Amino acid sequence: MIPRQDLPLPERLCRAVAGQQLSVKAAASIWNRVVENAEGTPLIDHFAIVDPQVLRGCGLSGAKAKAMGAIAAAALAGDLNAEMLGRMKTEARTQQLTQILGVGHWTANMLNIFYFGDPDIWPEEIRRHERLWNG
């Protein structure tokens, strides 16, 4: 898998959260409204200061709007350094990412595959059970 790093990690993470459980078309429409709302301000800076209600007006749910703020806070605190996270093992990276409000295992694993290019995202515990099951 070739990593898709066309956006900075925090922004890619926000976009992944924004698109959860939505059709591709709906997610793109909402994301475009979010970008327009930022009016040229870098998105992470915008998410750090914008009222979640403003993001709700763009079409994000309340939970997703809060997640954008939490992701921005983590990015500004230096917790979303792509180079540092890229050197981590998948499980450790997942654990780090899921500490952020609104980022679950599914989202972390999608980043592990598509942003970091990990070929195998299954936690060791699942691989161990699979080996036991398959003999």
Image: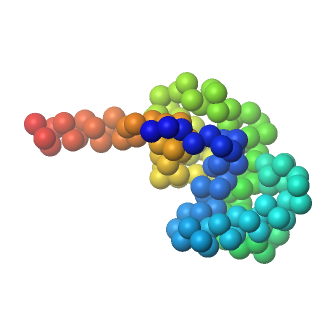
Vertical arrangement, residue 114 with respect to residue 23, above or below: above
Rendered position, 39 above or below 134 = below
Tell me: 37 left or right of 32: right
How far across and how far down the image is residue 128, in percent? 25, 35
- Res. 37 image quadrant: bottom right
Q: In the drawing, does residue 64 fall left or right of residue 52?
A: left
Badge count: 0
Q: Residue at x 61, y 73 (%)?
A: 26
Residue 29, quarter of the rendered image: bottom right
- Is residue 95 visible from the viewing direction of this image? no
Image spot of residue 95 (x, y percent) = 52, 39
In the image, residue 119 lies at what x, y percent? 40, 36
Quadrant in which the C terminus appears? top left
Q: Position of residue 35 (x, y in %)?
A: 79, 61
The residue at the point 40 percent across, 40 percent down is 121
Q: For the N terminus, which image quadrant?
A: top left
To which quarter of the image does residue 66 belong? bottom right
Which residue is located at x 74 percent, y 65 percent?
Answer: 32
